[in-house]
Image (spheres, grey):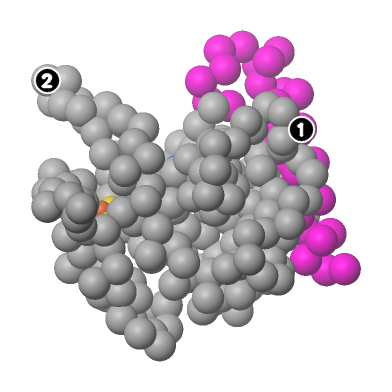
Amino acid sequence: MVDEERPGAQQWVPDKADIAELAGAAAHCRGCELYRDATQVVFSAGPSSSGLMLVGEQPGDQEDQRGRPFVGPAGRLLAEALTAASIETTSVYLTNAVKHFRFERRGKARIHKTPDVGHITACMPWLEAELKTVRPAVVVCLGATAGRAVLGRTVRVGAERGTLLPGPEKLAPAQVLLTTHPSALLRLRSSKDRAPAFAQLVDDLVTARDAVRS
Ligand code: URA
Ligand code: SF4
């Protein structure tokens, strides 16, 4: 049964489109209800020729307002980690599993709300089209939502992070690597906890970088 609120994005995804055309089409997507309260779609950033694709969860408050992924606090931390891993930030293709911001209003604030599996599934046709177009050698999943989208199963980031995993058939020949979402680092209170978590994220990005080059 097709859920009327969540028919999924497929009917909005054009065939044989490049990334700019996909991004343009995504602005009209009504594949789930998230488009209604969000300001705009946030598609992707970075060159479609990149061998390295990074997949986040969903746009945050600032991304929603500016229409670009990873421009808020998590994005700044990610940029720091990429630099520490000797990866040029602008050389990476950056996207999200879910393309509209999901949030709850609390007074004037908009509080991030993790997308449900239903949102991930509804939005998946966009990510599939991106994977087919970019054909990255390595896909880094930042956190469990991205891992779930790319691998099509529940993942445990703590247990599975840091090793190269074979991509599912539809992604071939990409390898997949799970790592911590930079937002999770931001939630760690003390710098004592943050430093090793940051070092681990950098290590994982180095593993991905080396796998792209080999
Ligand atoms: N967190 C994400 O997962 N993606 C963004 O674009 C910003 C924050
Ligand atoms: Fe479409 Fe994804 Fe936005 Fe839902 S979140 S409306 S599926 S682009």
Residue at disc 2, CB closer than 8 Å to ligand 1: no
Work out whether residue 27 can be spotted: no
Asked which secondary structure carries label 1, the reply is: helix
What residue is drawn where x is 31% and y is 30%?
113
Residue 204 in the magenta stretch? The answer is yes
Amino acid identity at mark 1: Ala
Residue 57 at x, y percent in the picture: 44, 44
Corner quadrant of residue 119: top left
Identify residue type, mark 2: Gly
Q: Is residue 190 found left or right of 36 in the rendered image?
A: right
Q: Nearer the viewer, residue 183 or 173?
A: 173
Q: Is residue 91 left or right of residue 116?
A: right
Query: Which residue lies under the disc numbered 1?
Result: 199
**Residue corresponding to mark 2:** 107
- Label 2 crowd bin: few (<14), some (14–19), many (20+), radius 10 Å: few
Q: Does 202 appear above or below 110?
A: below
Mark 1 or 2, nearer chain start = 2
> Which x, y percent locates residue 30?
17, 60
150 or 101, nearer to the observer: 150
Instruction: Decide: is 158 above or below 58.
Output: above
Residue 61: image x %, image y %? 29, 39
Q: Please tell me which residue is depicted at 50% across the width and 32% down the height of the picture.
A: 183
Question: Which x, y percent locates residue 109?
Answer: 20, 26
Q: Main secondary structure of the magenta part?
A: helix
* Position of 196 relative to 9 (above/below): above
Toward the viewer: 147 or 82?
A: 147
The quarter of the rendered structure image containing the C terminus is bottom right
Label 2 secondary element: loop
Residue beneath the point at 66% across and 43% down: 178
Quarter-of-image position of residue 99: bottom left
Magenta stretch, residue numbers: 185-214
